[in-house]
Amino acid sequence: METIKVACVGFGTIGSGVVKLLLENEDRIAQHAGCRLELAAVVDTDLTRTRNVEVPPELLTDDIERVIGDPEIRVVTELVGGIEPARSIVLQLLESGKDVVTANKALLAEHGPELFHRARQLGRSIAFEASVAGGIPIIAAIGQSMTANQILSLRGILNGTSNFIVSKMEESGADYGEAVCEAQLHGYAEANPAMDVDGTDAAQKLAILAQLAFGAHAAWQQIPRMGIDRLYRADIRFAGELGYRIKLLAVARLTDEGLELHVSPTLVRIGSPLAEVREAFNAISVLGDAVGPVFLHGLGAGQLPTASAVVADMIDTVVGRTRITFERLAMWSQPESRIAMCDFARVSARYYLRFGVEDRPGVLAQIAGVLGEHQISIASVIQHESADSEEGGIVWLVIMTHTALEGAADEALRQIDQLDFVRGPSIRLPVLDEETSVPTVG
Amino acid sequence: METIKVACVGFGTIGSGVVKLLLENEDRIAQHAGCRLELAAVVDTDLTRTRNVEVPPELLTDDIERVIGDPEIRVVTELVGGIEPARSIVLQLLESGKDVVTANKALLAEHGPELFHRARQLGRSIAFEASVAGGIPIIAAIGQSMTANQILSLRGILNGTSNFIVSKMEESGADYGEAVCEAQLHGYAEANPAMDVDGTDAAQKLAILAQLAFGAHAAWQQIPRMGIDRLYRADIRFAGELGYRIKLLAVARLTDEGLELHVSPTLVRIGSPLAEVREAFNAISVLGDAVGPVFLHGLGAGQLPTASAVVADMIDTVVGRTRITFERLAMWSQPESRIAMCDFARVSARYYLRFGVEDRPGVLAQIAGVLGEHQISIASVIQHESADSEEGGIVWLVIMTHTALEGAADEALRQIDQLDFVRGPSIRLPVLDEETSVPTVG
């Protein structure tokens, strides 16, 4: 049986998982690859840190040249993370004739066009299943299994850290800060979880999916996004009273006015599949015009689930499937977006509005007045006794609207925030109502 | 752009869906395939029936020779269904140099080894994503995306007709016969739904998945199976009282004693993903040793969802991915099973037991006595006032056991059925308790 040399650049959590799978499951991998994958080098700047896998010391190096300069190494995983030096490393790897497998969503969201263009010029491939939703095969599902479809919408819980925090706030009544601490204790959140909780990570993954499914050139920085860091536990409780859970959703949806893209904590009806996604799990609901709704659920992060996707990509690269897919996918292959973005202000949704207000007469009337001026009609109102407030002296007022334009809701909120009895920041979250456009079965 | 000729043998429900997608989405398909797929012939014995798609009359023929004899036709879908003439047609297609795409689970479960062997001999490929769970990409998930894993278990709701019937019995309190009628009215059940409701269809699909995931040579006829046709609405109600829903599950699970395979209505805890699968949806929960649990949900049957999988397979065949996958999959490539089946009598589970008994003293004591003799201990008992009975004069007695061996439970039931106060058939259903072996995240 032939042997093909592979290497791993980046020996952190995911890198250790990849090394572990490659070393411990050689035979199983060889059976699927039709050849032996020989780990020829593991590159990291830190050669001393303890990892949960034993690697033969002669394979470990801090010199990337050992990989770049070895023409026998054909497939290399980039698991450094972040933008630089990851970008330069990937370019060097491609230029030295290697196919690349990456889990780096930040890099693809930022430099995907450049890297994919260079790979095509050089006749090389980039596989990236692990970059979105870890062990869930969403890239393969859209890029291969659903190619007979026009994708109509994608809705994903793509950040496990945020989902863990929001789930804890719901289950144990913890406030945001307590839930973040618990996520850190369980290893689900970094010491600085900003990119996870502010929606950046989800927006980067959404940018990749939007390119894959719609050919949309969406800079992740331009995707309207809100994170879970602005939620109070009262929001979780009010949503529950209304029959919903709050989930950080990344949404891409075809509309008559173009592609709608955004990341936001969203009210999802209890009992629907996305609402039942717990702990640090990820999930994606895809709607195709032929296949109907397809829902995928699994671990979106973590050492072995992510390594599972990376090693499957390495096998696909070795057997030649990646090359074919990479050529056909047309990811970032055109200078222009294949679809126009719809103006976010023209997106319509039902909204959950929460205000902290002084407990005095006339408050509801004035707020309702402003909403009415913006053609936003009210579906329901919750206001409890003031004991509910998180700060002394204010009470929460929650309003569910009927369908309204984002732009109008935004403007109304800005005016309401200037009323003298409104204290502290208001919040506006979209409500997901299930799509019913399922193809006829028969 | 190059044009490749394709043909469709079988112009029933699925065939019409495939023709519809090919004719109406030419450009989209060409983009993914890198060439135009030209539909060159549609073969069916019935040329007059009305279909919901217009096909140019010169393409429609009842002469398979128009396909076999045309060397320009390279990819052909077999959508005839059943064993013969489907088997002969597939062999003829392979021998005339064509790659085959099929949705025919009965044919693969019965003649997979012969057909795959012949295809390999001839250097051809067979793609079969649509044969299991229609629009859910389970074949790709196991055969490509999870190749770095040892699959530990598979649990599927693979028969949409059964799931629709059981869901209706639960939601509307319909009895089995009424629910079957409703399924027929909605087009979810054939005039004779025997193969769907008796577990045959699910066992055939399970045989395919067991070969794919475990290399198991399991004749579907030898897979222990029970259908939903033995359920009373009282079972649905009792399961609900106990916190469960009844779902027809197909299970393949690695145990220390070999591969456990069976199809049975199973009690699944309310709130778990499989329990929430409604209507005619299918779902599969796969546990991999690296990736952890992956759950896929979608439409498992119906014209366009199934056609979506067929056309994706046609595209994969044209671009060359199918050839690579077919060579590596090693489906039915070895004369012997790669894994031993575990003796079904040695499988252990918790069981739901339901008896129809006369309402007189001593009944519970005697039944409990027989169970005790077989080392089966009782977890809980439900017996309501006799108004609950579906027939006059008997009452239902329901017992949930602790974990017991299948063989012991089977023997105990046989003895209990012979007691003079037991009237009508008893039933024994396994209870699915969630696996907790999820890889560590962090």
Image (tube, coloured by chain):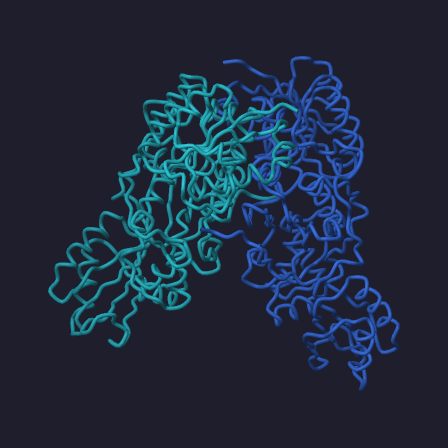
Chain colours: A blue, B cyan
In the rendered image, residue A118, in percent from the top left (x then y), is placed at 77, 24
Q: Nearer the viewer, residue B280 or A129?
A: B280
**On screen, residue B323 above or below A12:** above
- Left or right, A56 with respect to B346, comes to right
Q: Nearer the viewer, residue A263 or B316?
A: B316
Extreme-left residue of the structure: B420
Mark yes or no: residue B359 visible. yes
Image-based side of B193 in relation to A39, left or right: left
Q: Quadrant of residue A346?
A: bottom right
- In terms of image quadrants, where is residue A421? bottom right
Q: Nearer the viewer, residue A347 or A171?
A: A347
Q: Residue at x 31, y 67 (%)?
A: B234
Residue B296 x %, y %:
51, 46
Q: Residue at x 26, y 48 (%)?
A: B406
Please give left or right for residue B398 compared with residue A187 in the image: left
Residue B120 lies, with reference to residue B272, above or below; the image says above
Q: How many numbered discs sit on the rendered protein?
A: 0
Query: Residue B21 sits in which quadrant?
Result: top right
Coordinates of residue A253 in the picture (x, y in percent): 68, 51
Residue A94 location, x and y as percent? 73, 21
Q: Can residue A135 be seen by looking at this rendering?
A: no
From the viewer's perspective, is A36 left or right of A203?
left
